[in-house]
Amino acid sequence: MKLLPNYGRLALLVVWSYCVAVATPMAYGQDTRYVSDRVLVPVRSGAGSDFRIVDSGLPSGTALMVFGESEDGKWAEIETRAGTRGWMPSQFLQAEPPASLLMNELKLEVEQLRSERDRVVSQLNQRSSAADEADDTILTLRSELEATTNELTEVKRVSAAALDLDALNQQLVAEVESERSDADLLRLENVRLRERIANNQILDGALAVLLGVILAVVTPRLWPSKKRQDGWS
């Protein structure tokens, strides 16, 4: 047994087109019409149009299980998935799915492809936005890095200047201490010198007094005094 579709869209279109072309007078051909692909094929109890109808009609695209064919090959014994079993003309059966089913499958596939495309486009847009944000973040980080580098350079410069200033300060402190020591020594020497001068002045005064005394004592002896002549002499 093999599973086959009920009948083909193309075969139905050909049959119904022929019927419509034969049955429709030329007077009624003023407007354009189309043959419907919605055709119902009856299922009979035997291999012939005289047998009883067990199903009023199967729609196009119905999948059937085929068990065999009549001797002339015009009828096929089939069974539907619902369990209805009978005979129908073999001309309405084909091995491939009808065009309507293929079209529906294609439409479904197209819709799926469109959905997938929309999803991919959405992801691409999101990734593009994320990439733009990443670029902005990179630019911001670069700016911050440059600013930090400049600050670090300034800190190094200030630190170097501070170190130089500290060294200079220490040098100045040492020089001030040295000058202070020298000033203390000079102050001490000045005090000593003043004391020495004061002592010398005292000594000079004492010597002057002593010299005056000596002169007062010695001088009269160096020049003897004349005796006062008496008027009576």
Image: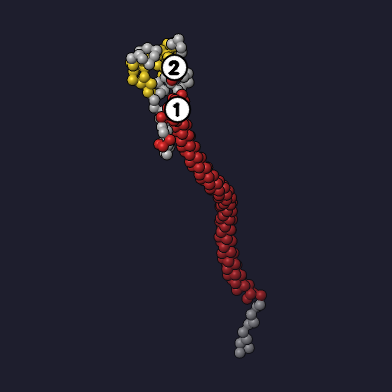
Q: Is 21 above or below relative to 198? A: above
Q: Nearer the viewer, residue 109 or 127?
A: 109
Are the residues at dot 2 and dot 1 in contact (C-beta closer than 8 Å)?
Answer: no
* Residue at image point 62% right, 84% down: 228
Q: Quadrant of the N terminus?
A: top left
Q: Residue furthest right?
A: 222
Residue at the (60%, 73%) spot, across then down: 216
Left or right: 113 in relation to 195: left
Which residue does the image show at 57% across and 60% down from the upper left? 190
Q: Is residue 141 visible?
A: no
Where, by quadrant of the figure, is residue 18 drawn? top left
Q: Name the mark on residue 150.
A: none
Residue extending furthest bottom? 231
Identify the residue shown where x is 63% and y is 82%: 227
140 vs 31, nearest the viewer: 31
Q: Position of residue 179 (x, y in %)?
A: 58, 56
For residue 142, above or below residue 52: below
Picture coordinates of residue 21 (x, y %)? 44, 30
Q: Nearer the viewer, residue 105 or 12?
A: 12
Q: Nearer the viewer, mark 2 or mark 1?
A: 1
Image side of residue 128 versus residue 211, left or right: left
Residue denoted by label 2? 90
Per the image, the residue denoted by label 1 is 18
Q: CA distance from mark 2 to mark 1?
A: 18 Å
Residue 35, percent from left and from top: 42, 30
187 vs 14, nearest the viewer: 14
Q: Quadrant of residue 211?
A: bottom right
- Helix, strand or loop for disc 1: helix
Q: Element under label 2? A: helix
